[in-house]
Amino acid sequence: MTKGACCAAIVWHHLAFYGPMSDVAAQVTPGIIEWLAEYARIAVQIFLVMGGFLSAASLAPQGVARFGSPLAKIGQRALRLLAPYSVALLLAVLIAALVRPWFAHESVPAEPTWQQLIANALMLQDISGEDALSAGVWYVAIDFQLFAAVTLLFAFSRRWPRQWLGLQLGQWVVLAMTALSLLVLNRHSELDMWFVYFIGAYGMGMLAFWGSQSAKPWSWTAALLALGLLSLEVDFRLRIAVALCGAVALLWLMRVPSDSRLVDWLGRQAPVRWLQSLGQMGYSVFLVHFSIVVLCNAVVSHVWPSQPWLNWLGMGLAFALSLLAGRALYLGVEARTPSLRSVARWELGLVGAGLLVSLVGARLSM
């Protein structure tokens, strides 16, 4: 449910941030558009916390690695991320090429270069200094970095399985890395292309999982609060405050028995079921929605260039189409077990389509 709500928030953030529909709609609802553009993106912090929570649950639920080969684990993660990712970027390249001749707007990516295509295909766009082909793909690269880092950490730390003060070595290292990020590294925006910038929120999610499984949840809660409040005292950042609240809430919510009356009642509510469904396909929606936003912006600004309420209607339509496109991507690609061959095929298709678009664009401009 939470993942679905955060996914919806990110889509609406991009709808508000990337005009021109939102620019026209802001004439009648400036406060709503401004809030969505400025604050809805904070939902990414909850994604990071939940990512850390799920990583701890799958990699080291007791603080010790329960997987075999770390490289195999990282490879599986890469394939699962890259399969829908490459399809979504292929769609982004094609839609940008479709609207570029008649929709001159800064949100439309320029014709891609081969260096840009390869960097994006390998999730290295920020590290290599290349422009992203779609909004939000930076998060996919960071998610992979975080997962790979903690996988290698637990693979290394299981060589020393002894506990210190009730915690395994890997848990101590996660605690230390979380503190270092929150107190120092997360305060330097030039590091935001690397996992160390984000492991503060991600690490709090991991601590929240171990706390939810512990016989002493208050001790874990105290550790989270101490880390979070100290980092906010050093340098207040709204994103860290949201991540802290999310981690503490997640710790205690996951201690509620799954067969409780509250959980049963919530599970029967239509909005909750809808958010759960959205959360299940949230990654695909996250990947594909920007292309839909660009396309709808192009069409609506051409048909209704100055009518605020019709542009609001266009934003709502873009949101609905983003969910439909995300569902199609989820069912057609993400929900299937990816193979190296299928991922390579989509990656090559992305690069090939991008090069073809650039070639055609160059010929037409001659």
Image (spheres, grey):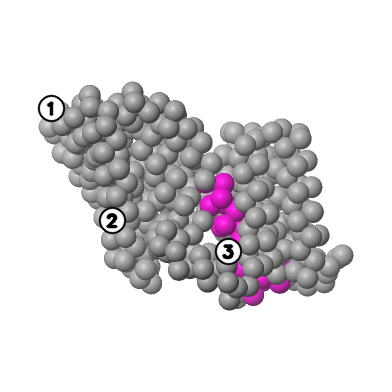
Identify residue type, mark 3.
Leu
Identify residue type, mark 2.
Leu
Q: Is residue 320 left or right of residue 202?
A: left
Q: Residue drawn at (53%, 71%), measured in percent from left and top?
A: 264
- Distance from the alpha carbon under mark 2 to that under mark 3: 26 Å
Residues 18 and 174: in front is: 18
Q: Is residue 310 left or right of residue 285?
A: left
Q: Residue drawn at (26%, 44%), measured in percent from left and top?
A: 317
Residues 217 and 154: in front is: 217
Disc 1: CA contacts within 10 A as few (<14), some (14-19) or many (>=20): few
Q: Sequence-wise, which precedes: disc 2 or disc 1?
A: 2
The residue wearing badge 2 is 324
Disc 3: CA contacts within 10 A as few (<14), some (14-19) or many (>=20): some
Q: Disc 1 or disc 3, which is closer to the eye? A: 3
Residue 339 seen in the figure: no
- Distance from the alpha carbon under mark 2 to that under mark 1: 38 Å
Q: Residue drawn at (56%, 50%), measured in percent from left and top?
A: 46
The image's mark for residue 54 is: 3
Q: Secondary structure at mark 3?
A: helix
Residue 69, quarter of picture: bottom right
Q: Secondary structure at mark 1?
A: loop
Q: Sequence-wise, which precedes: disc 1 or disc 3?
A: 3
Q: Disc 2 or disc 1, which is closer to the eye? A: 2
How many marks do you count on the picture? 3
**Residue numbers of the magenta segment:** 44-66
Residue 240, how many percent across, how many down?
A: 64, 42
The residue wearing badge 1 is 366
Residue 238, quarter of picture: top right
Q: Is residue 268 above or below residue 103?
A: below
Residue 242, how many percent across, how many down?
A: 62, 44
